[in-house]
Image: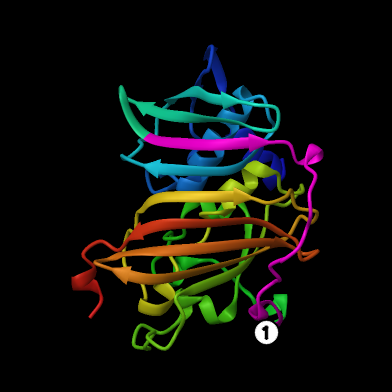
Amino acid sequence: MNQFEKFQKALKLENVEDNKFIVNPDINYFVGNTPHGGYLMAIMHKALTNILAHSTAISSSVQYLDRIDAKPFELEVEVFKTSRGSSSGIVKLKQDNKICTTFTGTCSDFEFMKGYDDLQKPLPDIFNDSDKKDYVKMNYDKISKGFTPAFIQQLECSIHPDHAWWNREPSSSNYSNEARCSAFLELEGGIPDQFCLSFFSDILPPVVCNKYGPLGWIPTITLTTHIRRIPSTSVLYADFKASDINKGYFEQDCNIWDLNENLVASSRQLTRILKSEEKIS
């Protein structure tokens, strides 16, 4: 089974009653003992599109409210509105009778969309700075053996050489570096679908690490993703940037293109550096 097929299998939903599913999360898509945020987003995304009248979640927002353990959880879908061109609703993830995550989304159908195209966002200049062969496989074993999260081992992920902060010597200064991470991404075996794009929108490590070095667990508070089109190539290019650290909270923006230079998705998340006043000085 290739990487793309494994990912699709990991999104399996068991329909137990109207608008309600049970999920047994796949530990291969975990960070430590909890599901990866992008993986959760993809599962909830799939649950919503299984219920709504339109096929693709073109806009969605996730609120990560509480920790999720490595055991089955329930997804409950509520439809807000259905019209000719779009539909919207919410998915509530419950574990131990507690709402842990919510996913609100609006769905439409790309194949029926009509309208004017302009103001395209091009691939960033950094895409042409280095050859793909010079990009670095994401692997944190230099920091600590077995430190690379399980979820990142389920895809091909190559990082721009200027953003591979884990390969730097501990004594080196990071402060001249950007809070940025650019990468080639691929789930080998298929063209990414909408669920892959949700997964990829939170796939890279918090980019503040490229500027400040390892900062421990940096939780995502909320993540909003817009899917602009379905990719036409199996390999995608992602560019993540952070800005405006305020009391330890910062925004991380992401744009993802296919290799035919089409912007396929964009996202923004609010994230927090825990005990930032102690870790950054």
Residue at (41, 71) in percent of width and height: 243
Question: Residue at the spot x=43%, y=26% of the render?
Answer: 72
| Rendered residue at 39%/57% (across/down) | 270
Q: Amino acid at mark 1?
A: Asp
Q: Is residue 274 left or right of residue 15?
A: left
User: Residue drawn 25% across and 76% down?
Assistant: 280
Q: Nearer the viewer, residue 47 or 151?
A: 47
Residue 28, visible in the rendered structure? no
Residue 89 position (above or below residue 217) = above
Q: Which residues are magenta?
A: 101-129
Residue found farthest to the top: 17
Query: Where is mark 1, residue-wise?
Result: 129
Left or right: residue 260 versus residue 157 is right
Residue 125 magenta: yes
Q: Is residue 143 left or right of residue 260?
A: left
| Residue 227 visible somewhere in the drawing | yes
- Residue 112 at x, y percent in the picture: 80, 37
Q: Secondary structure at mark 1?
A: loop
Q: Classify residue 11 by image quadrant.
A: top right
Q: Is residue 254 magenta?
A: no
Pick the quarter of the image with the N terminus: top right
Neighbour tally class for label 1: few under 14, some 14-19, many 20 plus, Cα within 10 Å: few
- Residue 133 falls in image quadrant: bottom right
